[in-house]
Amino acid sequence: MTAAALALTEVGKIYRTASGPVQALDGIDFRIAEGEFLSILGPSGCGKSTLLSLASGLEFPTSGTVEQAGRRIDRPVTDIGIVFQTDVLLDWRRVLDNVMIQPQIRGLDLKAYEQKARDLLALVGLAGFEDKYPYELSGGMRQRVSICRALIHNPPLLLMDEPFGALDALTREQMVMELHQLWLRERKSVMFVTHDIQEAILLAQRVLVMTPRPGRIAEIVEVDLPFPRRPETMESRRFVEIVAHVRHLFERHGVLKKY
Amino acid sequence: MDRFRIPTSLDGPIVGLLILIVWETGVRIGGVPAYLLPPPSAIAQRLFTDWDQLLYHFAATTLEVVIGFVLAIVVSIPLAALLAQIRIFERMLYPVLVASQTIPKVAIAPLLVVWFGFGLMPKVLIAFLICFFPIVVDSLVGFRSAPKEVSWLARSMGASRWQTFVNFQVPAALPHIFAGVKVASTLAIVGAIVGEFVAADRGLGYQLIVANGALDVTLSFTVLVVLSLMGVALFALVDRVERWALPWHVSQRLKHGGSP
Ligand SMILES: Nc1ncnc2c1ncn2[C@@H]1O[C@H](COP(=O)(O)OP(=O)(O)OP(=O)(O)O)[C@@H](O)[C@H]1O
Ligand SMILES: [Mg+2]
Protein backbone atom coordinates (compact mmCIF):
# COMPACT_ATOMS: atom_id res chain seq x y z
CA MET A 1 0.00 0.00 0.00
CA THR A 2 1.39 3.41 -0.90
CA ALA A 3 1.75 6.02 1.82
CA ALA A 4 -1.35 8.16 2.16
CA ALA A 5 -1.11 11.90 1.51
CA LEU A 6 -2.54 12.33 4.98
CA ALA A 7 -3.29 9.77 7.67
CA LEU A 8 -4.88 10.39 11.05
CA THR A 9 -4.87 7.53 13.52
CA GLU A 10 -7.09 7.57 16.62
CA VAL A 11 -6.67 11.33 16.92
CA GLY A 12 -8.11 13.15 19.90
CA LYS A 13 -7.77 16.83 20.74
CA ILE A 14 -8.52 18.42 24.07
CA TYR A 15 -8.22 22.19 24.50
CA ARG A 16 -7.33 23.35 27.96
CA THR A 17 -9.30 26.48 28.70
CA ALA A 18 -9.85 28.64 31.75
CA SER A 19 -13.22 26.98 32.27
CA GLY A 20 -11.87 23.45 32.05
CA PRO A 21 -10.87 21.07 29.25
CA VAL A 22 -12.85 21.04 26.00
CA GLN A 23 -12.84 17.84 24.01
CA ALA A 24 -12.86 19.07 20.42
CA LEU A 25 -12.09 15.79 18.62
CA ASP A 26 -12.29 12.16 19.64
CA GLY A 27 -11.20 8.97 17.89
CA ILE A 28 -10.70 10.50 14.47
CA ASP A 29 -9.29 7.89 12.13
CA PHE A 30 -9.06 8.35 8.37
CA ARG A 31 -6.65 8.75 5.49
CA ILE A 32 -6.58 10.75 2.31
CA ALA A 33 -5.01 8.86 -0.57
CA GLU A 34 -2.61 10.48 -3.00
CA GLY A 35 -4.78 12.57 -5.35
CA GLU A 36 -7.99 12.02 -3.41
CA PHE A 37 -10.63 14.68 -2.78
CA LEU A 38 -12.13 14.26 0.69
CA SER A 39 -14.84 16.53 2.05
CA ILE A 40 -15.22 17.03 5.79
CA LEU A 41 -18.83 17.81 6.58
CA GLY A 42 -20.17 18.74 9.97
CA PRO A 43 -22.15 21.27 11.98
CA SER A 44 -20.62 24.40 13.46
CA GLY A 45 -18.29 23.74 16.38
CA CYS A 46 -17.76 20.04 15.68
CA GLY A 47 -14.01 20.47 15.25
CA LYS A 48 -13.51 20.88 11.51
CA SER A 49 -11.09 23.77 11.83
CA THR A 50 -9.30 21.94 14.61
CA LEU A 51 -8.90 18.98 12.28
CA LEU A 52 -7.33 21.24 9.70
CA SER A 53 -4.87 22.73 12.18
CA LEU A 54 -3.81 19.21 13.21
CA ALA A 55 -3.44 18.09 9.59
CA SER A 56 -1.14 21.02 8.87
CA GLY A 57 1.03 20.58 11.95
CA LEU A 58 0.03 23.98 13.29
CA GLU A 59 -1.41 22.29 16.36
CA PHE A 60 -0.77 18.84 17.72
CA PRO A 61 -3.18 16.12 18.81
CA THR A 62 -3.60 15.27 22.48
CA SER A 63 -3.70 11.60 21.52
CA GLY A 64 -3.12 9.61 18.36
CA THR A 65 -0.88 10.45 15.41
CA VAL A 66 -0.97 12.53 12.26
CA GLU A 67 1.18 11.38 9.35
CA GLN A 68 1.89 12.89 6.00
CA ALA A 69 3.38 10.77 3.21
CA GLY A 70 4.26 8.19 5.86
CA ARG A 71 6.05 10.63 8.18
CA ARG A 72 4.75 11.65 11.55
CA ILE A 73 4.16 15.38 11.75
CA ASP A 74 5.94 17.17 14.56
CA ARG A 75 6.26 20.64 13.09
CA PRO A 76 4.28 22.91 10.72
CA VAL A 77 4.06 21.33 7.30
CA THR A 78 5.23 23.63 4.51
CA ASP A 79 4.53 21.76 1.29
CA ILE A 80 0.80 22.32 1.54
CA GLY A 81 -1.63 25.06 0.60
CA ILE A 82 -4.01 26.22 3.30
CA VAL A 83 -7.16 28.30 2.91
CA PHE A 84 -8.10 29.36 6.42
CA GLN A 85 -11.68 29.92 7.49
CA THR A 86 -10.96 33.64 7.79
CA ASP A 87 -9.16 34.99 4.75
CA VAL A 88 -6.04 36.10 6.69
CA LEU A 89 -5.12 38.68 4.07
CA LEU A 90 -2.33 41.05 4.99
CA ASP A 91 -3.95 44.50 5.13
CA TRP A 92 -0.74 46.28 4.17
CA ARG A 93 -0.22 44.37 0.94
CA ARG A 94 -2.05 44.87 -2.31
CA VAL A 95 -3.96 41.94 -3.76
CA LEU A 96 -1.13 40.77 -6.02
CA ASP A 97 1.42 41.12 -3.22
CA ASN A 98 -0.83 39.12 -0.91
CA VAL A 99 -0.60 36.23 -3.34
CA MET A 100 3.10 36.85 -3.96
CA ILE A 101 3.99 36.59 -0.26
CA GLN A 102 3.99 32.83 -0.77
CA PRO A 103 6.77 32.61 -3.42
CA GLN A 104 8.55 35.50 -1.72
CA ILE A 105 8.86 33.76 1.64
CA ARG A 106 9.75 30.50 -0.05
CA GLY A 107 12.50 32.18 -2.06
CA LEU A 108 11.05 31.22 -5.46
CA ASP A 109 11.61 33.02 -8.75
CA LEU A 110 9.42 36.10 -8.37
CA LYS A 111 9.28 36.99 -12.08
CA ALA A 112 7.84 33.64 -13.10
CA TYR A 113 5.43 33.51 -10.19
CA GLU A 114 4.07 36.98 -10.77
CA GLN A 115 2.58 35.87 -14.07
CA LYS A 116 1.16 32.83 -12.36
CA ALA A 117 -0.36 34.99 -9.63
CA ARG A 118 -2.04 37.19 -12.25
CA ASP A 119 -3.38 34.14 -14.06
CA LEU A 120 -4.79 32.69 -10.84
CA LEU A 121 -6.44 35.98 -9.90
CA ALA A 122 -8.00 36.13 -13.35
CA LEU A 123 -9.21 32.55 -12.94
CA VAL A 124 -11.13 33.45 -9.78
CA GLY A 125 -12.57 36.56 -11.43
CA LEU A 126 -10.30 39.17 -9.87
CA ALA A 127 -8.55 40.48 -12.97
CA GLY A 128 -8.18 44.23 -12.59
CA PHE A 129 -8.06 44.10 -8.80
CA GLU A 130 -4.33 43.29 -8.52
CA ASP A 131 -3.41 46.72 -7.16
CA LYS A 132 -6.27 47.13 -4.69
CA TYR A 133 -5.78 46.89 -0.97
CA PRO A 134 -7.78 44.21 0.90
CA TYR A 135 -10.02 46.82 2.55
CA GLU A 136 -11.27 47.72 -0.92
CA LEU A 137 -12.60 44.19 -1.52
CA SER A 138 -15.78 42.41 -0.49
CA GLY A 139 -15.66 39.40 1.83
CA GLY A 140 -16.06 36.94 -1.02
CA MET A 141 -13.35 38.64 -3.08
CA ARG A 142 -10.98 38.52 -0.13
CA GLN A 143 -11.53 34.81 0.30
CA ARG A 144 -10.83 34.27 -3.40
CA VAL A 145 -7.50 36.06 -3.02
CA SER A 146 -6.61 33.72 -0.18
CA ILE A 147 -7.46 30.75 -2.41
CA CYS A 148 -4.98 32.03 -4.99
CA ARG A 149 -2.39 32.36 -2.26
CA ALA A 150 -2.91 28.74 -1.28
CA LEU A 151 -2.53 27.52 -4.86
CA ILE A 152 0.32 29.57 -6.28
CA HIS A 153 3.19 27.36 -5.12
CA ASN A 154 1.48 24.30 -6.57
CA PRO A 155 1.28 22.25 -3.36
CA PRO A 156 0.51 18.52 -3.61
CA LEU A 157 -1.91 18.74 -0.66
CA LEU A 158 -4.61 21.37 -0.24
CA LEU A 159 -6.41 22.05 3.03
CA MET A 160 -9.45 24.28 2.63
CA ASP A 161 -11.60 25.49 5.52
CA GLU A 162 -15.00 26.60 4.24
CA PRO A 163 -13.37 28.51 1.39
CA PHE A 164 -16.66 29.44 -0.26
CA GLY A 165 -18.52 30.34 2.92
CA ALA A 166 -18.49 34.07 2.19
CA LEU A 167 -19.65 33.79 -1.43
CA ASP A 168 -23.07 34.38 -2.90
CA ALA A 169 -24.80 31.33 -4.38
CA LEU A 170 -23.94 32.19 -7.99
CA THR A 171 -20.25 32.90 -7.49
CA ARG A 172 -20.15 29.93 -5.21
CA GLU A 173 -21.37 27.50 -7.84
CA GLN A 174 -18.86 28.91 -10.28
CA MET A 175 -15.99 28.58 -7.79
CA VAL A 176 -17.01 25.05 -6.90
CA MET A 177 -16.83 24.13 -10.58
CA GLU A 178 -13.46 25.85 -11.00
CA LEU A 179 -12.08 23.93 -8.04
CA HIS A 180 -13.44 20.72 -9.50
CA GLN A 181 -11.80 21.41 -12.87
CA LEU A 182 -8.53 22.23 -11.16
CA TRP A 183 -8.65 19.00 -9.21
CA LEU A 184 -9.45 16.96 -12.33
CA ARG A 185 -6.48 18.59 -14.10
CA GLU A 186 -3.90 18.38 -11.35
CA ARG A 187 -5.15 15.63 -9.07
CA LYS A 188 -3.97 17.22 -5.88
CA SER A 189 -4.91 15.63 -2.60
CA VAL A 190 -7.60 17.83 -1.08
CA MET A 191 -9.16 18.05 2.37
CA PHE A 192 -12.18 20.26 1.89
CA VAL A 193 -14.02 21.46 4.99
CA THR A 194 -17.59 22.63 4.58
CA HIS A 195 -20.98 22.63 6.23
CA ASP A 196 -22.81 22.56 2.92
CA ILE A 197 -24.08 19.07 2.12
CA GLN A 198 -24.47 19.57 -1.65
CA GLU A 199 -21.06 21.17 -2.04
CA ALA A 200 -19.39 18.44 0.00
CA ILE A 201 -20.89 15.69 -2.15
CA LEU A 202 -20.54 17.37 -5.53
CA LEU A 203 -16.78 17.85 -5.17
CA ALA A 204 -15.65 14.76 -3.32
CA GLN A 205 -14.84 11.13 -3.81
CA ARG A 206 -15.66 10.55 -0.17
CA VAL A 207 -17.43 12.65 2.43
CA LEU A 208 -16.42 12.39 6.06
CA VAL A 209 -19.52 13.23 8.09
CA MET A 210 -18.86 14.43 11.62
CA THR A 211 -21.00 14.39 14.74
CA PRO A 212 -21.45 17.43 16.99
CA ARG A 213 -19.13 18.02 19.93
CA PRO A 214 -16.99 16.17 20.66
CA GLY A 215 -16.29 15.71 16.96
CA ARG A 216 -16.33 12.07 15.98
CA ILE A 217 -16.71 10.40 12.61
CA ALA A 218 -20.36 9.51 12.00
CA GLU A 219 -19.60 7.84 8.68
CA ILE A 220 -17.34 8.15 5.69
CA VAL A 221 -19.73 8.21 2.72
CA GLU A 222 -18.54 7.00 -0.69
CA VAL A 223 -19.65 9.30 -3.50
CA ASP A 224 -19.91 7.03 -6.53
CA LEU A 225 -20.94 9.69 -9.01
CA PRO A 226 -19.20 9.81 -12.38
CA PHE A 227 -16.64 12.49 -13.29
CA PRO A 228 -16.56 15.21 -14.41
CA ARG A 229 -19.30 16.51 -12.14
CA ARG A 230 -21.48 19.35 -13.35
CA PRO A 231 -24.12 21.54 -11.76
CA GLU A 232 -26.68 19.18 -13.34
CA THR A 233 -25.14 16.33 -11.37
CA MET A 234 -27.04 17.68 -8.38
CA GLU A 235 -30.29 16.72 -10.11
CA SER A 236 -29.24 13.10 -10.70
CA ARG A 237 -31.00 10.37 -8.76
CA ARG A 238 -27.83 9.03 -7.17
CA PHE A 239 -26.85 12.52 -5.94
CA VAL A 240 -30.24 13.02 -4.34
CA GLU A 241 -29.95 9.62 -2.69
CA ILE A 242 -26.57 10.45 -1.18
CA VAL A 243 -27.86 13.79 0.08
CA ALA A 244 -30.78 11.97 1.70
CA HIS A 245 -28.40 9.51 3.30
CA VAL A 246 -26.26 12.29 4.77
CA ARG A 247 -29.32 14.15 6.03
CA HIS A 248 -30.42 10.96 7.67
CA LEU A 249 -27.05 10.69 9.42
CA PHE A 250 -27.42 14.23 10.74
CA GLU A 251 -30.94 13.50 11.92
CA ARG A 252 -29.68 10.48 13.80
CA HIS A 253 -27.07 12.60 15.58
CA GLY A 254 -29.53 15.36 16.37
CA VAL A 255 -28.00 17.93 14.04
CA LEU A 256 -31.08 18.07 11.85
CA LYS A 257 -34.58 17.78 13.19
CA LYS A 258 -37.05 15.49 11.49
CA TYR A 259 -40.21 17.21 10.25
CA MET B 1 -30.95 70.30 -4.21
CA ASP B 2 -27.32 71.16 -3.75
CA ARG B 3 -26.81 72.75 -0.39
CA PHE B 4 -23.69 74.80 0.35
CA ARG B 5 -21.38 72.75 2.59
CA ILE B 6 -18.25 73.75 4.41
CA PRO B 7 -15.29 71.60 3.34
CA THR B 8 -14.33 69.34 6.26
CA SER B 9 -10.72 70.46 6.02
CA LEU B 10 -11.85 73.91 7.19
CA ASP B 11 -13.73 72.69 10.28
CA GLY B 12 -10.74 73.21 12.58
CA PRO B 13 -9.69 76.67 11.35
CA ILE B 14 -13.28 77.93 11.47
CA VAL B 15 -13.76 76.85 15.08
CA GLY B 16 -10.38 78.42 15.94
CA LEU B 17 -11.37 81.67 14.30
CA LEU B 18 -14.68 81.74 16.18
CA ILE B 19 -12.89 81.30 19.50
CA LEU B 20 -10.51 84.15 18.65
CA ILE B 21 -13.41 86.46 17.76
CA VAL B 22 -15.30 85.66 20.96
CA TRP B 23 -12.12 86.14 22.98
CA GLU B 24 -11.26 89.47 21.37
CA THR B 25 -14.74 90.97 21.65
CA GLY B 26 -15.21 89.56 25.17
CA VAL B 27 -12.04 91.16 26.42
CA ARG B 28 -12.82 94.48 24.75
CA ILE B 29 -16.46 94.72 25.80
CA GLY B 30 -15.82 93.37 29.28
CA GLY B 31 -12.88 95.71 29.75
CA VAL B 32 -10.62 92.93 31.05
CA PRO B 33 -7.20 94.43 31.80
CA ALA B 34 -4.33 93.13 29.65
CA TYR B 35 -2.35 91.97 32.70
CA LEU B 36 -5.06 89.39 33.37
CA LEU B 37 -6.09 88.29 29.89
CA PRO B 38 -4.61 89.98 26.84
CA PRO B 39 -6.71 90.07 23.65
CA PRO B 40 -5.53 87.98 20.67
CA SER B 41 -4.62 91.15 18.83
CA ALA B 42 -2.11 92.10 21.53
CA ILE B 43 -0.60 88.61 21.35
CA ALA B 44 -0.33 88.83 17.57
CA GLN B 45 1.36 92.18 17.91
CA ARG B 46 3.82 90.78 20.43
CA LEU B 47 4.55 87.86 18.12
CA PHE B 48 5.50 90.44 15.52
CA THR B 49 7.60 92.80 17.65
CA ASP B 50 9.45 90.16 19.72
CA TRP B 51 9.98 87.68 16.92
CA ASP B 52 13.79 87.59 17.25
CA GLN B 53 13.67 86.78 20.98
CA LEU B 54 10.94 84.22 20.44
CA LEU B 55 12.80 82.61 17.59
CA TYR B 56 15.94 82.29 19.69
CA HIS B 57 14.12 80.50 22.49
CA PHE B 58 12.02 78.54 20.07
CA ALA B 59 15.16 77.16 18.44
CA ALA B 60 16.59 76.13 21.82
CA THR B 61 13.42 74.28 22.85
CA THR B 62 12.98 72.70 19.44
CA LEU B 63 16.46 71.23 19.63
CA GLU B 64 15.71 69.64 23.02
CA VAL B 65 12.34 68.36 21.89
CA VAL B 66 13.59 66.87 18.65
CA ILE B 67 16.60 65.14 20.16
CA GLY B 68 14.58 63.72 23.06
CA PHE B 69 11.73 62.63 20.78
CA VAL B 70 13.94 61.01 18.16
CA LEU B 71 16.00 59.31 20.85
CA ALA B 72 12.83 57.89 22.38
CA ILE B 73 11.68 56.55 19.01
CA VAL B 74 15.04 55.02 18.24
CA VAL B 75 15.30 53.32 21.63
CA SER B 76 11.66 52.36 22.31
CA ILE B 77 10.71 50.60 19.10
CA PRO B 78 13.64 48.16 18.98
CA LEU B 79 13.21 47.55 22.71
CA ALA B 80 9.53 46.72 22.20
CA ALA B 81 10.45 44.45 19.28
CA LEU B 82 12.92 42.63 21.50
CA LEU B 83 10.43 42.30 24.34
CA ALA B 84 7.87 40.92 21.91
CA GLN B 85 10.28 38.29 20.59
CA ILE B 86 11.56 36.95 23.85
CA ARG B 87 8.93 36.18 26.45
CA ILE B 88 11.35 36.05 29.36
CA PHE B 89 12.59 39.57 28.57
CA GLU B 90 9.07 40.85 28.72
CA ARG B 91 8.38 39.06 31.99
CA MET B 92 11.54 40.47 33.56
CA LEU B 93 11.66 43.96 32.09
CA TYR B 94 8.06 45.01 31.64
CA PRO B 95 7.24 45.30 35.39
CA VAL B 96 10.39 47.39 35.83
CA LEU B 97 9.27 49.66 33.00
CA VAL B 98 5.82 50.09 34.48
CA ALA B 99 7.20 50.72 37.94
CA SER B 100 9.65 53.31 36.62
CA GLN B 101 6.80 55.01 34.84
CA THR B 102 4.96 55.68 38.08
CA ILE B 103 7.72 58.08 39.15
CA PRO B 104 6.59 61.54 38.04
CA LYS B 105 9.08 62.99 35.57
CA VAL B 106 8.65 66.43 37.11
CA ALA B 107 9.96 65.03 40.39
CA ILE B 108 13.19 63.73 38.92
CA ALA B 109 13.89 66.80 36.83
CA PRO B 110 15.86 68.54 39.62
CA LEU B 111 17.88 65.38 40.13
CA LEU B 112 18.78 65.25 36.45
CA VAL B 113 19.98 68.82 36.69
CA VAL B 114 22.24 67.85 39.60
CA TRP B 115 23.63 64.97 37.57
CA PHE B 116 23.91 66.54 34.13
CA GLY B 117 24.19 70.29 34.73
CA PHE B 118 22.27 73.17 33.23
CA GLY B 119 22.82 72.45 29.55
CA LEU B 120 20.95 70.56 26.87
CA MET B 121 21.32 67.14 28.48
CA PRO B 122 18.74 67.17 31.31
CA LYS B 123 16.01 68.64 29.06
CA VAL B 124 16.63 66.06 26.38
CA LEU B 125 16.57 63.33 29.00
CA ILE B 126 13.26 64.42 30.47
CA ALA B 127 11.71 64.68 27.01
CA PHE B 128 13.09 61.24 26.26
CA LEU B 129 11.80 59.72 29.49
CA ILE B 130 8.30 61.09 28.97
CA CYS B 131 8.12 59.90 25.35
CA PHE B 132 9.64 56.53 25.99
CA PHE B 133 6.80 54.77 27.77
CA PRO B 134 3.84 55.35 25.43
CA ILE B 135 5.95 54.29 22.46
CA VAL B 136 7.14 51.10 24.16
CA VAL B 137 3.67 50.13 25.33
CA ASP B 138 1.93 50.79 22.02
CA SER B 139 4.70 49.17 20.00
CA LEU B 140 4.63 46.09 22.18
CA VAL B 141 0.88 45.78 21.65
CA GLY B 142 1.55 46.26 17.95
CA PHE B 143 4.21 43.58 17.67
CA ARG B 144 1.77 41.19 19.31
CA SER B 145 -1.27 42.33 17.34
CA ALA B 146 -1.17 39.82 14.48
CA PRO B 147 -3.87 37.18 15.05
CA LYS B 148 -3.00 33.52 15.48
CA GLU B 149 -3.90 32.77 11.87
CA VAL B 150 -1.29 35.19 10.57
CA SER B 151 1.50 33.43 12.42
CA TRP B 152 0.01 30.13 11.23
CA LEU B 153 0.15 31.39 7.68
CA ALA B 154 3.79 32.38 8.15
CA ARG B 155 4.68 28.99 9.60
CA SER B 156 2.87 27.07 6.88
CA MET B 157 5.07 28.89 4.37
CA GLY B 158 8.17 27.93 6.31
CA ALA B 159 9.02 31.53 7.15
CA SER B 160 12.13 32.00 9.27
CA ARG B 161 11.95 34.04 12.44
CA TRP B 162 13.45 37.03 10.69
CA GLN B 163 11.09 36.70 7.70
CA THR B 164 8.15 36.50 10.08
CA PHE B 165 9.34 39.58 11.91
CA VAL B 166 9.91 41.68 8.79
CA ASN B 167 6.95 40.54 6.69
CA PHE B 168 4.25 39.99 9.29
CA GLN B 169 5.05 41.42 12.70
CA VAL B 170 6.47 44.81 11.76
CA PRO B 171 3.77 45.83 9.24
CA ALA B 172 1.04 44.73 11.64
CA ALA B 173 2.71 46.74 14.42
CA LEU B 174 3.13 49.99 12.49
CA PRO B 175 -0.34 51.47 13.13
CA HIS B 176 0.13 50.91 16.86
CA ILE B 177 3.65 52.31 16.75
CA PHE B 178 2.38 55.44 15.07
CA ALA B 179 -0.33 55.82 17.70
CA GLY B 180 2.35 55.73 20.40
CA VAL B 181 4.62 58.11 18.54
CA LYS B 182 1.74 60.58 18.11
CA VAL B 183 1.06 60.63 21.84
CA ALA B 184 4.77 61.01 22.46
CA SER B 185 5.05 63.91 20.02
CA THR B 186 2.86 66.06 22.26
CA LEU B 187 4.55 64.84 25.45
CA ALA B 188 8.06 65.64 24.19
CA ILE B 189 7.34 69.36 24.44
CA VAL B 190 6.01 68.97 27.97
CA GLY B 191 9.25 67.22 28.90
CA ALA B 192 11.50 69.91 27.49
CA ILE B 193 9.50 72.71 29.17
CA VAL B 194 9.62 70.93 32.54
CA GLY B 195 13.38 70.70 32.17
CA GLU B 196 13.63 74.37 31.35
CA PHE B 197 11.46 75.32 34.33
CA VAL B 198 13.94 73.70 36.68
CA ALA B 199 17.11 75.24 35.35
CA ALA B 200 17.81 76.96 32.06
CA ASP B 201 19.11 80.15 30.48
CA ARG B 202 17.25 79.74 27.22
CA GLY B 203 14.20 78.05 25.70
CA LEU B 204 10.50 78.86 25.70
CA GLY B 205 10.10 77.43 29.22
CA TYR B 206 12.77 79.81 30.45
CA GLN B 207 11.11 82.69 28.61
CA LEU B 208 7.81 81.79 30.23
CA ILE B 209 9.36 81.96 33.71
CA VAL B 210 10.96 85.32 32.93
CA ALA B 211 7.69 86.70 31.54
CA ASN B 212 5.81 85.52 34.61
CA GLY B 213 8.38 87.07 36.91
CA ALA B 214 7.93 90.38 35.15
CA LEU B 215 4.14 90.00 35.24
CA ASP B 216 4.24 90.32 31.46
CA VAL B 217 1.10 88.27 30.82
CA THR B 218 0.96 89.17 27.16
CA LEU B 219 4.42 87.70 26.63
CA SER B 220 3.40 84.57 28.59
CA PHE B 221 0.46 84.12 26.26
CA THR B 222 2.63 84.72 23.23
CA VAL B 223 5.04 82.00 24.34
CA LEU B 224 2.10 79.66 24.94
CA VAL B 225 0.91 80.29 21.41
CA VAL B 226 4.34 79.49 20.05
CA LEU B 227 4.44 76.31 22.14
CA SER B 228 1.10 75.10 20.92
CA LEU B 229 2.05 75.85 17.32
CA MET B 230 5.17 73.76 17.87
CA GLY B 231 3.07 70.92 19.24
CA VAL B 232 0.62 71.05 16.36
CA ALA B 233 3.47 71.11 13.85
CA LEU B 234 5.19 68.09 15.37
CA PHE B 235 1.93 66.16 15.52
CA ALA B 236 1.10 67.08 11.94
CA LEU B 237 4.55 65.93 10.84
CA VAL B 238 4.05 62.50 12.41
CA ASP B 239 0.58 62.33 10.86
CA ARG B 240 2.04 63.11 7.45
CA VAL B 241 4.65 60.40 7.76
CA GLU B 242 1.92 57.96 8.79
CA ARG B 243 -0.22 58.80 5.79
CA TRP B 244 2.74 58.29 3.54
CA ALA B 245 3.90 55.07 5.16
CA LEU B 246 0.54 53.42 5.82
CA PRO B 247 -1.91 54.39 3.09
CA TRP B 248 -3.79 51.12 3.68
CA HIS B 249 -4.30 51.90 7.34
CA VAL B 250 -5.19 55.58 7.14
CA SER B 251 -7.80 55.11 4.44
CA GLN B 252 -9.30 52.19 6.31
CA ARG B 253 -9.57 54.31 9.43
CA LEU B 254 -11.27 57.08 7.50
CA LYS B 255 -13.65 54.63 5.92
CA HIS B 256 -14.78 53.41 9.30
CA GLY B 257 -15.51 56.94 10.39
CA GLY B 258 -12.70 57.27 12.91
CA SER B 259 -11.00 60.59 13.41
CA PRO B 260 -8.09 61.19 11.03
N1 LIG C 1 -7.91 27.48 20.65
C1 LIG C 1 -8.97 26.94 21.25
N2 LIG C 1 -9.08 26.93 22.59
C2 LIG C 1 -10.13 26.37 23.19
N3 LIG C 1 -11.15 25.78 22.56
C3 LIG C 1 -11.12 25.75 21.22
C4 LIG C 1 -10.03 26.32 20.50
N4 LIG C 1 -10.27 26.15 19.19
C5 LIG C 1 -11.44 25.51 19.11
N5 LIG C 1 -11.96 25.25 20.32
C6 LIG C 1 -13.20 24.52 20.61
O1 LIG C 1 -13.16 23.31 19.89
C7 LIG C 1 -14.41 23.07 19.28
C8 LIG C 1 -14.24 22.89 17.80
O2 LIG C 1 -13.87 24.13 17.22
P1 LIG C 1 -13.61 24.29 15.66
O3 LIG C 1 -13.20 25.69 15.43
O4 LIG C 1 -12.68 23.24 15.22
O5 LIG C 1 -15.07 24.04 15.07
P2 LIG C 1 -15.57 24.08 13.55
O6 LIG C 1 -16.12 22.76 13.24
O7 LIG C 1 -14.49 24.58 12.67
O8 LIG C 1 -16.76 25.11 13.61
P3 LIG C 1 -17.25 26.17 12.49
O9 LIG C 1 -17.99 25.40 11.45
O10 LIG C 1 -18.16 27.07 13.25
O11 LIG C 1 -16.04 26.83 11.98
C9 LIG C 1 -15.33 24.20 19.66
O12 LIG C 1 -16.14 23.78 20.71
C10 LIG C 1 -14.41 25.29 20.14
O13 LIG C 1 -15.01 25.99 21.19
MG1 LIG D 1 -14.24 26.20 11.58
Image: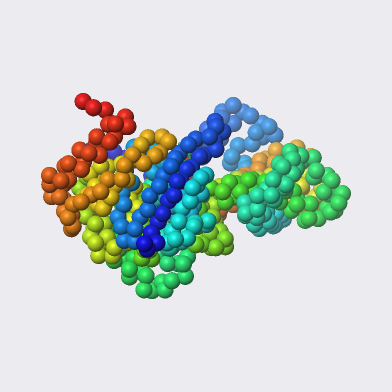
Residue at point 18%, 57% (across, down): A227
Residue at point 68%, 32% (across, down): B36
Q: Is residue B138 left or right of residue B67?
A: left
Residue at point 84%, 49% (across, down): B113
Residue B190 picture quarter = top right
Indicate the quadrant containing the N terminus of chain A: top left, top right, bottom left or bottom right. bottom left
In-front residue for pair B54/B241: B241
In-front residue for pair B121/B129: B129
Q: Is residue A68 left or right of residue B123?
A: left
- Residue B29, position as x, y percentages in the image: 56, 28
In-front residue for pair B186/A217: A217
In-front residue for pair B198/B71: B71
- Residue B12, position as x, y percentages in the image: 48, 42
Residue at point 37%, 70% (across, down): A113
- Residue A84, position as x, y percentages in the image: 40, 50
For the question of whether residue B251 can be seen, the reply is no
Indicate the quadrant containing the C terminus of chain A: top left, top right, bottom left or bottom right. top left
**View extreme (front): residue:** A1
- Residue A92, position as x, y percentages in the image: 45, 56
